[in-house]
Image (spheres, coloured by chain):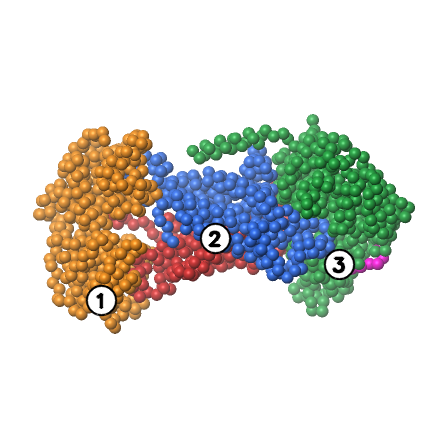
Amino acid sequence: MTLADATLVPAADRRWLTPSRAAGLVLLSLLAAFALIGPLLVLVDPTEQDFAASLAPPGADYLLGADHYGRSMLARLAYGARLSFGMALLTVATAAVPGILFGLFAAWRGGWLERVLELISTVLLALPGLLLVLILLAFAPGTFGPLYLGLALTLWIEFYRVTKATAAGVLKQPHIEAARLLGFGTPYLLRSLVLPEIRPILTTLAAFAMSTAIIAISTLSAISVGLRPPTPELGAMIVELLPYYAEAPLHVLMPGILIFLLVLGLQLATRNESL
Amino acid sequence: MSRMILARLLQAGLVVLVVGVLCFVLVRALPGDPAMRIAAGRYGPDANITEAAELVRRELGLNQPVLVQLGASLGQLAKLDLGRSLVTGLPITKELRIQLGATLWLSGATLVLSLVLGPPLGLFAGLSRGGWVDRASLGGAIILRSLPPFVLGLLLILFFAMLLGLFPPAGYGTWRDLALPALTLALSLAAVSSRVTRDAVSAVARTPYIAFARLKGLPEPVVMRRHILRNAAIPVVSYLALQAIYLIEGVVVVETLFGIPGIGHALVHAVIARDVPMVQGTALAMGLLFVVVAAGVDLTCHWLDPRPKRI
Amino acid sequence: MNAPTRFQSLAVSGLEIRAGDKAIVRNVAFTLAQGMPVTLLGASGSGKSLVAHAIMGSLPAGLCARGEVTLDGTSLLAASLAETRARWGRTIVILPQEPWFALDPTMRIGRQVSEVHHYLHGRGAIEARSHARSDLAEVGLDERAQAYSHELSGGMCQRAAIAITHAAGALLLIADEPTKGLDAALRDSVVKRLRMEVEQGRLLLTITHDIAVATALGGMIGVMLDGELVEFGPAAEILDRPRHDYSRALIAADPSRWPAPQLPPAGEPVVSATGLSKRFGEKALFDGFDISIGRGEIVAIVGPSGCGKTTIGNLLLGLVQSDRGRVELKAGVSPLRFQKLYQDPPAAFAPRQTLRRGFNDLLKLHSLDWRTSEELMARLHLVPALLDRRPDEVSGGELQRFAILRALMLDPVFLFADEATSRLDPVSQKDVIWLLVEIVRERGLGLLLVTHDTALAQRVAAKVVRLER
Amino acid sequence: MRRNWMIAALIGLSTIGAAEAKPLKVVGPWEIAGIDPAQSGYLFSRMQVAETLVSVDASGKLVGGLASSWSTEEDGLSWRFRLRDGARFHDGSPVSAAIVADTLRKVHAGTGVFSQVPVAAIEPEENDVVIRLSKPFVALPAYLVNFSTIVLAPSSFGASGRVERIVGSGPYRVKSLTPPLNMQLEVSPEWTGEKPGIAEVDYQAVGQGETRALMAESGEADLVFSMLPVSVERLKRNAKLDVRIATIPRTRLLKVNAASPLFSDIRVRRAISAALDREGITKVILRNSDLAATQLFPKALAGWHVPELAPLKRDLTAAKVLLADAGWTPGADGILQKDGKPFSFTLLTYASWPELPPIATAIQAQLRQVGIDAKVSVGNSSEIPARHKDGTLEMGLVSRLYSIVPDAIGVLRDDFRPGGSDWGATGWANDNLNGLIESMAATSDPAARLPLQRRAMEILQSELPAIPVTWSELAIVANKRISNVQVDPLEVNYGLAAVRWAQ
C-alpha cells in the first residue's frame, strides 16, 4: 500500500557502491587483470605441447596443471580468458549498440520505421539463430568474424525489444514533455532522461548476454564449427577436455569456473538493490 | 482478437516466404560445391566422393542456372510440397514428422519440468527477497547459466544414470529416455524463469491491490492463489515463450549428447550437407513453431490480463 | 447479513510509531465512538496515514507502533500477527486510497466481492455470488459485476471498494484519503456514502487533507503536523475556532476562505484560440471552443474529470493537435516562453536526477545565470539544500514550487497550470496558488488554471470557463 | 494441484515402460542416413538384416553369404555364384538368381566400389548368378562382400525405384525403422540357418562417444561399438563389462599434394614424416602406443605388413637436415623459408572421426618444432576431395579404410592410380606401383602375390605420397550378461545372431 507519509520514513541508503557492487567490481577487475596482464606474465606459449605432461595435475611444474597435450592450463586459461571475454564483450557490444539505438529510435519516432524494425526482428526471431550462425560460419570456417557477427545478429533483438518497450514507457511520462517544453533537444532527452531509466535492465541483459555468447561459442565448438585449434578459447577448452572428465575433472571445470566468475561478477556489479 | 489472429497469419505467411528464399539463397551462396557436400552427406567419409558428386549433380540438376533452381524450389514450396531430402531421399514431411516430433516431446517435457522447478522456486525467492532461498537461487541460476549444456548434461548423466541408476544415459523412445535431456534443458530454463518469477512476484506482492486483498481479510494462501499468482504469471508467460524459442534451437547439443533424433540435430546436418529442402523444412518448422508459440502466448496473456494492450 | 454486535469505541492513546530509534509519529491520542466519526486532517507527510495503518496493524516492515489502541477494551497492538490478520475485514476494514489501484486488474469486480463472502464467511459459491450482487446493488454497481477495474470510472471503483468493505462486514471502517484524485461531485457522493456508513452504526476513521470532507463528515477532527496530533476536538469547534497555528493555517487554506486577488485589468491576448474541436475515438470532447488569455490575466477552466479540460491547455501549447480550429500565440515571442505546470509534480521531474543536475542542464542550455535562479528560489521559499535531493525526496508542495521556478527561468508570457495543486494539501495548495497570483501580478504573464475545484477557480480567476462532460 | 497431476502421470508412464520384454540393446555411432544400400547398407549388413553374396569370417577369409559357393573358369573372366538353397526374403518370396543379377547390375552402374570391377555382363542362370568380366580380376568375390551389394527383395522398392523399406534375407528382419537414430529388429521366420539366440534387437545410434561409454557403464546397453580411447581403460576396470579390441585395417594418414611446390620434394615428405611424434600421438590421444603407424598397414594385415621395412619414426635432427638439403632455411620468426616464401600451409581435416582434429592439433605443434607452420582447418569431409579435385589441396589428415573390400588391393588400386583419388595420393604417380597392383589383381595364387605386395609397400614407404600417422583399433564393449560376442575387424558382420544371454 502506498503510504502518503513515505517522506516521514528515513530515505533508504542510496549509495551507489553497495557491498555487492563492490564485490562484483573487485571480481571483474581481477578477471580483467588475469585476461589482460595474465598472458604477459605467463611466459609459456599456450600452444606448446609436452606429451610427457599430459593431464598433469596442478602442481609445481604446471601451476594449474596441463591439458591432454601437456599444454599449460594457466597459459591457456589466461589467453582463453582474454579471447573469450574480449569476444563476448565485442559480441554483446555489437548486439547492444544497434539494438539500443534502434529501440530508442522506434520508441521515439514510431510510424513506419517502427513497423519495419518490428518486421525485421520478428522474422529474424522466427529464423533459427543457429541457422544464421552456421551459414555465416560456412563463409569463413573457424574464424572469429562470422562467429561474432552471427551471434550479434541473434542477440541484438532482445536489446531492441527491451529498449523499445521500456523507452516507450518512459517517453510517455510528463517529465519528458516538460523537458521538451523547456527547450531540451532530442539527444539530451534520450541521453540524460531515457537512458538512465533503462540502464539497469540493459546492464542485467548485457551480463546474461555475455555468458550466452561464451556458451554459444562452446556449443558451436561441440558441433565442430567453432574456432580452429589450437586457439585457446574457454568454451572450446571445455569441449576439448570433456572426454577426459573422468581422469581430470578439475581441468574440465577450470574454464567453466572462469565463465561462472565472470557472470557472477557482472551480476553483482549490475545488481539493482532497489529492484 | 480476430485482428490478432490475422496478424499472426500474415506473420506466418511472411515467415514461409522469407525462410524459403533466404534458406535457398544463403545455402546456395555458401562457398564449396554443393554436389560434393551432398555426396559426403549421403555416402559418408569413406566413399569416393568425387565420383558420387557427379552422379548427384546429374540427378539433382545442380548444373542448371541458379535462378531456375530457385524458381523450381519456390514453386514447390508454393504448392506446399517440401520435396525430398537430398541426402536421405526421404520426403521432408516424413523426416519432420520424426524429428519435429522428437523435439516437441523433448520441449514439452522440458517446459513441464521447468515449470515445476522454476516458478515455484521464484515464488519462494520473491516472497522472501534477500532471504537464503533468494540468494541460493540466484547463485544456482548463475552457475546454470555459466555451464555449457553438454557439461550440465554429462553431470546429470553421471548423477542420475550412473550413481543412482534412475534413468538411461541416452536413447529415445520411452519417457525414461526423455528424463535427463529434458532435465538438462529445464534446469537452464528454470534458472532464468525462476529469476523472472521472483522479480514478478516481488513486484506484484508490493502492489496496492495485493495489500487490499490482504486488508479485506483474505487468508494469505487465498491471496497467493487468486491474486499474486495470476498477476505474476503475466510477465513470466511472455518471457517463457521467448525462452521456449531459444529452447527449440538450443537443443542441438543436448540432442547429440542424448541421442535424440531432433530437429536441431537435423538442421545442423542439413546445413553441413547443403541439403536445401531439409534446411528449408527444418527452418520452416521452427519458424512456424515460433509463430504458433507467439500466438499461444498472446492468447494466454490475453486470458490472464484483460487490460487493453497498446497497438 | 447476520447482525454483528456494534462496536462502541476505539480508543487511541500515547501512540508512537518508530522507525528504528527514531519516533516518526508521537503522542497521538483520540477516541472514536458510535455516531461520532473521527477525521484526521494534515498535510502529506504529517503521519496521518501511518496512524491508520498502525490501528489496522499493517505498518510497512521496519516500522513499529507503541502505545495503546483498544477496540471495546481489546488491545489491538498487543495482538499477534495471526490475530491481526484474522481481524482484517471481519473487524476492521480499510477503504483504500485511489481504489482503481487497489482492485485486482485481472479479476472481475463481482468476483472480488464474492470471494470475500466465500473465504471470510465460508459461504458457498452460489450464495456468495448472490450476496455479492446485493452488495454491488447497494452501491449502484449491480450492472457492472462482470466489469474489470479498468472499465470503471474512478467513482465506480470507489463504490466497488465500498461494496467490498460491506461484504467483509467489519464495523470499524478506516477511510484512507477516500477522495484523493476525485473531482468535487464525486467527492460529495463519497462523503455522503461515508455518512451513511456512520448512520448504519459503523465506527469511521477518515484520513484526508480535504477540509471540505472533514466539514461534511462532522464528528471529531484531529489535526496532525510532523507526526504529532496538534489538536483534537469536535468538528464544529475546530473549524470555527482553531487553537493551534497550523490548524488555523489549514482552515484558512480552504479556497472558500481565500481573500480575492487584486489584479489589474488584462492586457492584449498572449494566447487565443477559435473554433477548437477534438475527438478521441468516438467521443467528441468539445466542438467550436473559443478561448483567449491576456497579459496579466487568470483564466480557469473547470469541469469533471474526462471533460477534456486538460486537452485544451495542451492544444494551446501545441502538445496535442486539434481536429479543427486555430491557435494563435502572441507574435514574435519564443515558443519557450509558453510553459506548463503538471498535476503530479514527481512525474514532471526526471526521477534519477538530482534537482541541481536538472537545473544546471537548463541553465547551461539557455546560457542563464545561477544568480537569477537563486533570487527566484528565495522568492519561492525554496532552500538551496533541497537542490541536492531527488524529486522523490522533497515534498509535493516544494516540488511544485521547483516546477514554477523552472518555468520562470524562461521568463514565460503564458503558463498552463494543469490541476497543479490537486495533489497538494490545502496549505501547500494555497502557497502555490498565491505564488502564481503574485507572479501574474508582477510579470504580467497569462495563466490558464485547469481545475476541478470550482471554489478555487472562482476565487482566483477573472474568467471561469465551465466544461461539461 | 498441478504437481500431483504430474507425479501421477509420471508413475503411470513408468509402469508402461517397465512392462516390455527385453531386447538386445545395441549402440553404435552410425546414423541411418537414408536407407539406400549405397548409403546405409553397411548397417543392414552388420546387423544381419540383409546379405551379400560373399562374406568373411573372423580371420578375414572369404566365406559364403547368399552364395553357398563360387567358381571361375580358366580364363578368369567368367564367375559363377551358386545361391544358397531355400534362401528366402523376409516377405516370404524366394531369393532368385534374377533378383540378385538385377541388383548387381544396378549397383555396378552406381558409385560404390563394385563399379570399379571390369564387369562385362551379369546374368542369372537357374540358381546361379554368372558374372562375366572384361579382363581377369581375381579379387571379384572380395568386392561382393561390400555392403553396397546387399540383395533386397523386390518389395523393398517403391514405384519410383527408390528403396522404401528394407526386406532382406538375413536372420533378422526390420521390425521398425526410425531414421536417423533407431532401428528395431526381430528374428525372421524365413531364416533357415541357425536360430538367433536373442529374439529382438534394438539399435540406437548415439553420436557422442562419451554417451556411448556411459550407456555401457550404466548397463543400459548390452553391446556398444566404437569406444573413445580415453574411455577404454575405465571400461576395462568395470567388472560387469567385457571390452574387446581389434586392430582394423584403417590408417590415419597425411595426404600431401606431391604436385605442390611445398611437397614435391621427396626429402620434404620424409622430413615431415620424421618430424611426427607418432608414439606421443598414439599414447596421448589414442592411449595405445602400439598404434603408431611405422608403415601404411598394421601388423594384423598379414601379407601387407612388411616387418623388414625400416619403421617410420621420429628423428628431429634428420628432419631438419632433410629440410635444409631441400633448400629450406629458418627465418627470423623461426619459420622455414625458401626463396623468401615461408613454409606455411593449411592442414585440412574433418570431424566425422572425432580423433582427427586432436591429431591434427598435435601434428601442428610437432611440425612447428621443425619450423613448419601448419594452420589447422576443420571442415566437412567433402572438402578434401574437393580440394584434391581442383588441385588446391596442400595437406589433409584423413582416415582411410582399407577393408571396403576385404582385399586391400581394392583400395590401393583406387588410391594410387594415376591422378590419385579422394583419399589416396594427390599429384603423385608411380608406374612401377601401378604395374605391381595390376599384376596382383590378375594373380590368384596368394603366395605369388606376396612379393608383389612387399615391393609395393617398399615403394610407398620410401616415396611417402601419403604419410602414415597412426593405425586404428575398434573397441567393443559387451555387458557380461551376454555371451558369444565376436569382433569382426573387417566390420562386415557383427554376428548378433550368435549372441546369447549369459546364464
The answer to whether residue C279 is visible is yes
Give the image location of residue D131, x and y in percent: 83, 46
Rendered residue at 56%/33% (across/down): B166
Rendered residue at 30%/46% (across/down): C151
Q: Looking at the image, do the residues carrying marks 2 and 3 touch, with CB atoms under 8 Å apart?
A: no
Give the image location of residue A89, x and y in percent: 50, 57
**Residue A83 among those drawn in magenta:** no
- Left or right of C347? Residue B142 is right
- The picture quadrant where one finds residue C171 is top left
Rendered residue at 73%/52% (across/down): B48
Q: Given this view, does label 1 or label 3 mark the residue nearer the observer?
A: 1
Q: In the image shown, does C127 or B267 lie closer to the viewer? A: C127
The residue that disc 1 covers is C271
Give the magenta part as a residue range: D427-433
Q: Colour of chain B?
A: blue
Q: Given this view, does label 2 or label 1 mark the residue nearer the observer?
A: 2
**What kind of residue is marked 2?**
Gln
Q: Colour of chain C?
A: orange
Q: Please give the chain letter of the residue carrying mark 1.
A: C
Q: Residue furthest right?
A: D74
The residue that disc 2 covers is B11
Q: Residues within 10 Å of mark 1 (few under 14, many from 20)?
A: many
Q: Colour of chain D?
A: green
